[in-house]
Amino acid sequence: MSKTDAPTHAPAASAAGAPERMRASIPTRRAFSEALVQYGETNADFWVLESDIGKSTYTYLFGEAYPDRYYNLGIAELGTFATAAGIASSGRSVVVAGYGVFITMRALEAIRSFIAYPNLDVKILSSHGGITAAIDGVTHQATEDIGTMSAIPGMRVLCPSDTASARACVETSFSVHGPVFTRLMRDPLFDIYSSGETFPFGESKTVRTGSDVTIVSYGDIVFQALEAAEQLATTGTSAEVIDLYSIKPYDRDGVLRSIRKTGALVVAENHQARNGVGYELAHLSLTEHPVPFRNLGLQDTFAESGAYQSLIEKYGISAHHIVEAANEVVAAK
């Protein structure tokens, strides 16, 4: 499938200004890699490295287009990132692709000490974020990656939710010097953004406006948040949904504006509840504008291998869990 096969028209607006969800035809991991190929047409200064899973991350597309700028270093993530640090130290930008669980564990020392500490220009394509790895099992489910990467000084963290935002995050990543971690998904879900929309660092997207409760999410759970908002509307509760695609830095002012308006906050994320976005926004609320709050994520547990929808239901981050949490915080007001 070429990069022109995915939907590129702007989705029609639905209730409360929310975008219509359309079934995605490709996963965000492929969308990001396709955009890398396109970006490589005008930027010949970066190389792409991967650890023997180029067919899965779709970085093989870059290798086919630019074979002299693409290197498979084998199943050795630590060595791959150490190599990236060496290349970047000479002034060349590098993209490194892999699965999130191996990037953020096997290669963590190289990322922290050899890349982030000297502020080298390495961009990370991290696939299979959270339990979107689904049937690949717990060994491939990166449910601690946002907390790990966000804690590294100087690391920027992005998590697009659909085709257009994943493609845009390539240009966003290269808009700054230094390390950037982009979390991507295993399977295609939905598309909500139009082609050409920009996703700058430190901003967010209000994908549905509301007045009673703010629901903040990112990546795949944005779609669960939108579904929850629709369900809440049938019972008279108006939910505002924020896609916090830029996790570090995040849109502090945008979140504050929303919770000052709604007076209640729910964070739902495909990640451990501990040390995720929920902890960051709980701190923001407590120090700036306390409101009733619920934090939905994996509750100090590993997941298991299974169908994606069944997993997010079991681990409490599906639409109906978000509805329950929203009703609780609205009642607490």
Image: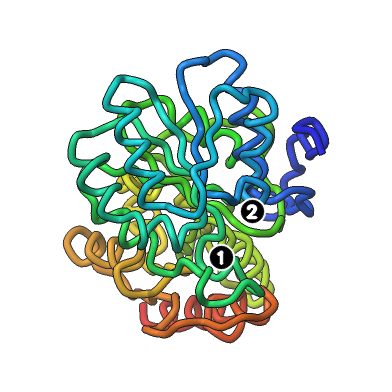
Residue at image position (66%, 43%) is 58
Q: Which amino acid does label 1 sit on?
A: Ser
Q: In which quarter of the image is the C terminus?
A: bottom left
Answer left or right for 14 relative to 101: right
Query: Is residue 266 at least partly visible in the picture?
Result: no
Q: Which of 153 and 281 is in front in this view?
A: 153
Total numbered labels: 2
Q: Looking at this view, name the residue that lies furthest to the front.
A: 74
Which of the numbered marks, if any, corresponds to residue 228? none
Name the image quarter holding residue 224: bottom right
Query: Are there few (<14), some (14-19), or many (20+) residues within 10 Å of tag 1?
Result: many
Which of the numbered marks, if any, corresponds to residue 238? 1
Residue at image position (79%, 54%) is 23
Answer left or right for 31 relative to 125: right
Q: Distance between the residues labelled 2 and 1?
A: 9 Å
Name the image quarter holding residue 330: bottom left
Q: Which amino acid does label 2 sit on?
A: Ala
> Mark 1 and mark 2 in contact (Cβ < 8 Å)?
yes
* SS label for mark 2: helix
* SS label for mark 1: loop
Image height of 17 relative to 92, above or below:
below
Residue tagged 2: 16
Residue at image position (62%, 45%) is 54
